[in-house]
Every structure is written in structure tokens, then in C-alpha cells.
Amino acid sequence: MSSDNIILRAEGLYKSYLMGTTEVRVLKGVDLSVKRGEFVAIIGASGSGKSTLLHILGALDKPDKGVVRFEGRDLGVQNMRQLNKFRNKSVGFVFQFYHLLDELNVLENVFLPIMAGRGIIGWLGCRRWANKRALDLLGELGLGERGKHKPYQLSGGERQRTAIARALMNEPKLLLADEPTGNLDSATGNGILRVFEKLNKAGQTIVMVTHDERIAERAGRIITLVDGKIENKSTKV
Amino acid sequence: MYKIILAIRYLLKRRISYFAVFAVALCVFVVFVVITVLSGLSAEFKANTHLSAGDCIVSSKSLVGFGYYQEFIDKLMRTDFVEATSPVIRSYAFVEATYESSETPEFSYTLGILGIDSAAHSRVTAFGEWLGFNKADAGNSFKPSYDPNLPGCVLGVGVLFGRDSEGNYIVPEEVPKYRVDVRCFPLTAKGALAKAGTGIVNTKTFYFSDCAESKIRADWSGLYLPFDEAQMLCGMGMEPKRVNAIHIKFKDGVGLDACCDKVEQLWDEFAEEKVGVSGANLLENVRVQNWKMYNRHIIAAVETERIVMMIVFGMIGIITVFIVLVVFYMIVSHKSKDIGILKSLGASNANVLSLFLGFASLIGVLGSLIGAVGGWQFLVHINHIEDWLFRRFGFQLWDRTIYAIGDIPNKIELNVLVPIVLCAVAACLIGAFIPSRQAAKYEPVETLQVAQL
């Protein structure tokens, strides 16, 4: 594996939480690396630490110990401003429960990463481009007519596709998906996975967390997390 | 941009924010109305007090008074800043008023005497404008219209007449014929009671010639007498003749305090010149005050009441801060998922803080505008509303038969309204700051996990 081609590398990640007075060790020395353009599935039982791992990889959480490098840069030494920029520009998150803002319509939700990364003047300056990009993304994801709808007016699959469009708005180098089909029926979940496969074919790097082996098999590589450790690293046959 | 959009949407979609807007609006409304009315009453009272006293008063600290006042008045009139002066006798008297040929007095009061030259006093004060029957010629105010040869007197309008439900005194068309017996305790220059039978008059009968409505205390307790008569009654007519005060009106455009200082300086020089003459000791017992200082005992009471009310309503403002604080705690706890989402998209702590403070500003501005417009409209119609309440339910905010208030003051002052609005917005920001800062510190992963539960 050429190190130039590695977009994300985690080395010796440890993370524990306090549950009352009891310390729960969630990650116990996780090492992994993701190549540019890869579609990686992290699979594990509930409580195995896979969501925690994904949050650490996306700089939403910090490890107690260990290093996460994105394109060679250690995220642990980045300041708040750099981490905000990293979350805004370099990664896109897709969550199990979509996490759309109820007060905004579909188009405004998709605009959010652009707006969050710019001031009013910056936003007004790129608004035409952002509008085209958002409409293109929604069109590609089959939501071309849904721009003005509120999240509560959408089905689960549509909400998740809106979340994907939002995650892709800033053209991130890495897409992190936490149980993206976990709240959907199998047909709708399949549709979402097809979107991921299509994106991956177009060169998008994706790291997806799931507890479902059948879903994980749709990824290019499966990493199994058991009890806070990576049990095996396998490539899809 | 998303902060503006979200702040507006939170305001429109979250019903709880309506409560915060309502609380702010109510606070601004109440404070605006109360301060406007109280300030109006206070200003009206001060204006009436000013009109009744002139600009500056040279007064004795005792009822004995001081002499050589005409010399000092001449000195004052030679200056370039004094417009007019009025020497005044002030004392107290037992007064009995008997209507026409009735044998029994209609009332018997102790009243404050003001001995004045009505024409001169009208030039210094608004005395002429207060008269009920001789507005056109204050010089005739001591001439009873039913017999100008009789010695006349002017009574405070409230001494003789009652008020209707709208607060207007019920003054008859023609001057009623009252005989007014005045009994004074004349004082010698040494401050002792003058003995009866030494040539000093201490009892005299006057005839009601006019009434004066100054809207201050004199309306209920004042008896205006011709200057010379009052001087004799009070034992001040012997040489050197004495007065209790000289009321002074300054020319337009001159500074009140500076001119009062000049008068004080003139008085000091005058008293210095008179050292050694008869009654010179009385000149040392004289003070020079501007109209506010002269009436400070009554102005202070009104001002204290106004300040206490402002403090009370300031506390309402503090309550508003707490209401906003509670509302924001609730909103922030409901919106923790949004905070997590925004942070996962790269929003900084400052972005989240400014989002919620922007939301608070919106609540403050909207609530203030509603309260200000509502208060404005209420004040514009306050007297109509009170009239309607009185006609419909017999209710009056201030019973006009008791209180000397005409219309409720409702002059809208931007220098009252603007600070109230600014304070309301600031109160919202203060109330929202702690919950907003707490929101800004949320770890995104915590809020997103909680939102999944």
C-alpha cells in the first residue's frame, strides 16, 4: 500500500468513557488506513465501538490516545479553527437518523456546509454556483422536485438522500457514513447503497459503519471491529 | 447567512419563543407607559412649580422677613439679566369665609398668606393666567367685581370650589360674594408677637374677588392678599418695611444657575453695605435659591416617587431577563441536535453563540417593537380609554375630585422610548447569553448521540 495513496490513517486509537464510576473501554488500540477512492465498511456488533471510531476519524470526537492522520496531517494537533475547516471542507457525514434541520427546507439543508464555511458576503458571492451544485446533486439523487419541501414531508430514503447531498455539497475528499441504512427498509437501503457505489465509482472515498454483513459486503473492503479492536482486515472477494 | 435564516425560523416555528416575545413586549409596554405618565406628571408638576415661583427667589429663612427689599429690587432691575421682580409676604392666618349676608361662616381654615402686587407678581409668575375671573387684567384681581371699592382677596380655587368628575373646578360664571375674615399673628422685627392695640392691624375683612388655579398646593391652602394689606397684617409695614421673599424672573436666554449666582453675589454685597443699619441682622438670614431648590421639599417627593416606580419597573426588566433565560435554556435543550449537526458541518463555537444571540436579538427587537407600538397607541388613546372607563364603569385612574390632574400626561418622548427599547434588547442578550454560551460549548458527538436516543 503506497503511503502517498493513503488519505486516512489511524494509529493506536484508544477511547474510553465513564459510565457512572465505571470506565468503559470502547477502542483498545485501533490501527487502520484508507486509500483514496476506497469504499470501506467497518462492521461490528452493537457496542463494539464502530460509531466512536467513525466520530474520531471525522474529528467529531478525540481519542484518549493514538493518532489520526488525514492526508498526512495529524488531526490531534490541529486547533479548533483548523478542525472546523476540516469538518466543513474535507469530510462529509451521513448519519443513521439523517440529522436534517427541521426548520430548513431540502435545498437550505443542502446549502448548509457552504453557508457554514462562509460569511454572508462569501455566501452571496457563491450563491449562484451553490444553487446549481445543490440542484445538480438533488437531481442526481432523485430529489430534483423536492427542494422546497421540509424534511418532515419526505420519506426516510429521501431524507437520507438529502443528507448525502448535504454531505457532498463541499466536494469532500472523504465521506463518513454511520449506519446510513439503519433506519430504512431494505429496498430503500439498497437504493442508498447504490448511490454510495455510484459515488465510489466516480472516485469518492467512503468509510461506512454498519452492523449488517450484507450491507458491508457492498463495500470494497470490510474491517471487522470486535470488542474495541480490529479483528481482521479483509478485502471483498 | 444560515444564522439569520435559522434565527428567523426558530422565532417563527418555536411557539415558546412567542412567550419570550410576549414577555419583552409586555415589559416594554408597561415600562414605557408608566415612565411616560409618571415623567409627564413630574414634568407638569415641576413646570407648575416653576411658574408659581419664578426663576430665582431671595427669601428669608424665618417668617420675620427682611427689610430694604425695595433697594435690592432697584439694584436687581439695574442688571442686564433680570426681567421682573415681585416682593412677597408669606405667613399664615386663620380665615373664615361667609357667603353674602349669612351669619354663619361657610368654612374656617388655616391658610398660607401670599401678599403680592398682582400685576408685578404676574410678570414674574403665571399668577395672571391662573385667575378665574380676571385673566385679562391681573391688576384688577383684588377688586371684587360686585363692588370694586371693597378690599379684595384671591383664594386658591380649591378652597371654595369642588371639582367635577373630569377634574375641572366648578367655578361659577359670576364672582360669588364671600366675606373673608383674616386673622394674623403679626411679628415684630425681633420675631416676637406684636401686641394688640399698638397700631398693627392683625384682623381684617376682605371680599372674595377671584380664584387662582396654579395646580399646586396653593390651590387648596393659599390666600392671596394685596401686598400692602398683607404687609400690615403680618406686622411688616413698619420701617424698615419687610418682606419674606423677592421672586425674580430672568430675561430669556440667560443661564439659570449663573444668574442665581450673580443674584447671590449682589445680595452678599448688599448685605455688606447694610451692616450696622437697623434690621441688618435680618439680612444675614436670607438665602438665594433657584426655583428647584426653593421648592425642593415638594419636588423631591414627586421625584422620589418617580424614581421608586422606575426601580420597581426596572425589576420587571430583571424578571424579563430571567424569562428569556428560561426560554433560551428550553430552546437550547430542544435544539441540541441542531447544534451537533451544525458543528459536524464545521460551524465554530462562535457561530453557534452568535446564532443564538442573534435569535435573542430578534426576540428583543420584535418584542420591543410590539411593546413600543402598543405603548405608543395606548398612550395616544389613554385619555379616551380613561373617559370610556369612567362613562362605562365609573372608574378613574386618579379620582379627579381628589387629585389635581387634568388629562393624563401622554407626551411621547423618544429619549424615554429609545433607552427602554435598547435596554429590552440588552436584557434579551443578557438572558440568552448563558444558555447560548452553554450551547456553543456542546460537543457535537454528545448532542448527536443524544439525538439518536
Image (spheres, coloured by chain):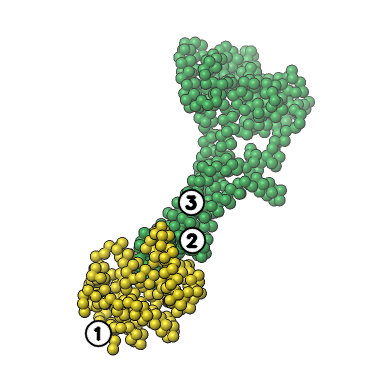
Q: What residue type is labelled 1?
A: Asn
Q: How far apart in space, not on screen, are marks 2 and 3 (Cα)? A: 19 Å
Q: How far apart in space, not on screen, are marks 3 and 1 (Cα)? A: 62 Å
On screen, residue A91 versus residue A99, left or right, reads: left
Q: Which of B343 and B207 is in front in this view?
A: B343
Q: Which amino acid does label 3 sit on?
A: Ala
Task: Determine the residue located farthest toward the right in the rendered image.
Answer: B101
Q: Which residue is drawn at 64% across and 22% down?
A: B118
Q: Which residue is drawn at 66% across and 29% down?
A: B130
| Residue B61 location (% of width, % of height) | 51, 24
- Where, quadrant-wise, is the C terminus of chain A in this rendering? bottom left
Q: Looking at the colours in the rendered structure, which chain would you say is drawn in yellow?
A: A
Q: Which amino acid does label 2 sit on?
A: Ile
- The residue that disc 1 covers is A232
- The residue that disc 2 covers is B8
Q: How crowded is mark 3: few (under 14 residues within 10 Å), some or many (20 or more)?
A: many
Tell me, for residue B424, which label it has, or none: 3
